[in-house]
Each structure stands twice: as structure tokens, then as C-alpha cells.
Amino acid sequence: MNMFKAAVIGLGNIGFFFDLDPLRKETWSHVSAYIKCLRTELVGVVDVDKEKIDIFKQHHNVLTFESIKELMENTAVDIVSICTPTEDHYAILKKLIEYPVKAIFCEKPLAPDICQAKEMVKLCKEKNIVLAINHTRRWDSNYQFAKELIEKGKIGKIKAVNTFYPGQLFNIGTHLLDAVRMLIQKDPCVLSGVSFDIEAQDPSVSGWIEFDESILCTVIATGERKDLVFEIDVVGDEGRMRIIENGEKVEWFVFVESTRCSGYRELSLMQMDPIQKKDRFVESINDIVSVIDGDESTVRCTGNDGYYSLALSVALFESAKEKGMTVNIGEFNAS
């Protein structure tokens, strides 16, 4: 097996500090994901905050740097994670692509605006650099199971989707929108949004999205990030797939002849074998490595996917600012 050298830029929560939460039992940071992956070696981290660097050194014997230039000129790096605030992603990526990196793993949202996001996708394509976006549910066993059942037609033709998320459109909301696109594999056409805190730094926006084949999706923000609610309910003409309990549980229903009303069908819960859970963060690194090594053609969450989740979020935000004005997004394309 080929081994690949990795680095993390930004030692915030997702970069490193989530590791210090005693209640988080799975892998929750880029630092830990690279350390646990059998095919990567964490060779360096970058942060301008010396206090964060000092805390990091208490836990890991890994080289630390204060700048990307210092990192890239003193170490050979194949994969780099961008874990800084969103407004810095574009500038950091532009610096990284001047070095011989093979892959960039960028936190969501991809960029602060769709123009920068589209340019980031374009630049990586031109440089033949793998660009992956950390919408983690792309590598989650439960979501992958639900996706495969839907692909196999187990709930028939998709008719409607209902979703809930706690709030913060450009943070948790982008995860939700990406997960919907992954599950139903349709492109969005038009949407409308509404918000009661549109002036917030990251507002909670609800609304509806019409996808191809007239699939209507509702998006409901419940308003409090700390009150975790992240659910997706996909209804087809032969059944239903529910992902509930913040992704910890999947339910599959099929329509059967009703025993209560002649000529009608009702949903019946199917019995399923337990889903074999994998460490989704480590799986994301394995996925990137597989593409670099030529074993897979593309990562599960591409730059284009990251662009779409951002574009949908921006469109919902713009619609909400205009009191629900319908926005046509059928022409959005990152390529």
C-alpha cells in the first residue's frame, strides 16, 4: 500500500479541538482522522494562534507551523485539510495549488460566496488536484445504506422529501442540503425561503425546493443549534425511507394492502439487519486516498457537490431576504 503524508491547516473544533470533548467517542477531527487512517501520516499542522499550537503539542508529537509557506517548504505533503474560517478557504486553496499537493480536503461551506466556490472547483480541476468537501454524511454508513436502498428502487419513484435541521443555514444547513442531493440524486430547479432571523450572522432559513421530476422538498429550521434535530424523510410511490435520531437510526417502510380501508395501501415498517457502522471521518480519508491511488475515479463528496450545497444555501438566503421570492436555480453548475 502507498502511504500519503497529510497536513491540517486550522486547529479549531473540526481541525483538532473536538478531540478534547470527552462525550465525542467517534472520530471528530481532521487531525484524528489522519492519525487513525492506516494509509496516511500526519506530518504537520498550521495555526497562527500560539495558544492552540501549545495545546496541540500537549497531545501530539507532530511538526507545527505558523504559515502555509513554512509548512510546504519544510515538509512533503500529499493531502491538506483546510479547517479555517470559511472566508479564508479561497485564499488558502490558491496558495496550496502552487505546491505539488495531490488532494485538498476542505471544510464546509466551500467558500463565502458562489463565485469563489466555482473558481476553487475550476482551479483544482486545472491542476488535477482532488478536491473533497467534508459533508460527513457522504461517508456515514446509515446514509450510505439509505442511499443504496433508494437507488435500488426499494421505495419506488421518489415523490416528496421532508427535512429538519436545528438552524444555521451556512453551517448545518449545507450538510442537510448536500445529504438530500446525495439521497435523491436529482438537481434543484426552483426554491423559496423564509426566515425569522435573517439578519443573524448565520440565519436559520426554512423553505421548499423543487428538484427534477417535480420532487418537492421541505426544509424546516427548528431554530436552536444546541437542540440537535437532523432528519430526512423520503417518500416514494412504493415506500418510505426515514433517517432519524440525528442519523443514528434508519427506518424503511413499504406500502402494503390496508387491513382497515378497502382499496387503499398503508406503510408497513420493514425488519432490517443491523447496519455495520464504520468510522465516517476515517472513511472520508480512505476515500480520498483511493482516488489519489487510482482505485476510485472520484471522491464521494466532490468540489461540485460542495458548490451545490453552497449555491442552494445562498439561493434560500436570498429568497428569504425577499420574503419568499421564488428563485430559479436550474442554471447553477460548477463545471
Image (cartoon, rainbow, N blue to C red):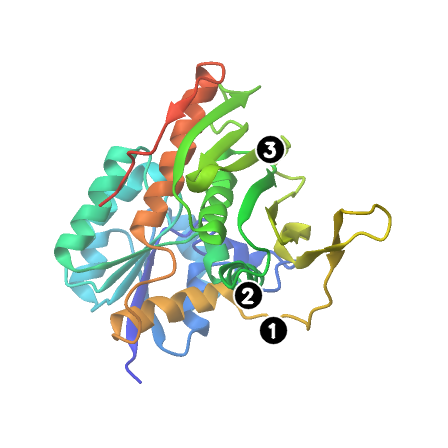
Kindly indicate the quadrant of the structure image that contains residue 104: bottom left
Q: Which residue is mark 1?
A: 276
As measured in the structure, the alpha-carbon distance from the residue carrying label 2 to the one carrying label 1 is 7 Å
As measured in the structure, the alpha-carbon distance from the residue carrying label 3 to the one carrying label 1 is 30 Å
**Label 1 crowd (10 A; few <14 / some 14-19 / many >=20):** few
The amino acid pointed to by label 3 is: Ile
Residue 23 shown left or right of residue 319 in the figure: right
Numbered label attached to residue 206: none
Q: Is residue 97 visible?
A: no
Q: Which residue is mark 2?
A: 141
What count of labels does the image hold?
Answer: 3
| Residue at the limit of the structure toward the right, as seen here | 260
Q: Is residue 306 visible?
A: yes
The amino acid pointed to by label 1 is: Gln
In the picture shown, does residue 156 fall above or below 25?
above
Q: Mark 2–mark 1 contact, CB under 8 Å?
A: yes
**Label 2 crowd (10 A; few <14 / some 14-19 / many >=20):** some
In the picture shown, does residue 286 fall above or below 151?
below
Of callouts 3 and 1, which one flags the residue occurring earlier in the amino acid sequence? 3
Say which residue appears at 48% left-offset and 50% top-offset. Answer: 184
Q: Secondary structure at mark 3?
A: strand
Say which residue appears at 44% left-offset and 17% top-offset. Answer: 325
| Residue at the limit of the structure toward the front, as seen here | 263
Say which residue appears at 46% left-offset and 73% top-offset. Answer: 36
Q: Secondary structure at mark 1?
A: loop
Residue 76 shown left or right of residue 262 in the figure: left
As measured in the structure, the alpha-carbon distance from the residue carrying label 2 to the one carrying label 3 is 24 Å
Q: Secondary structure at mark 2?
A: helix
Say which residue appears at 31% left-offset and 85% top-offset. Answer: 1
Q: Which residue is mark 3?
A: 220
Q: Position of residue 111 (x, y in %)?
A: 32, 39
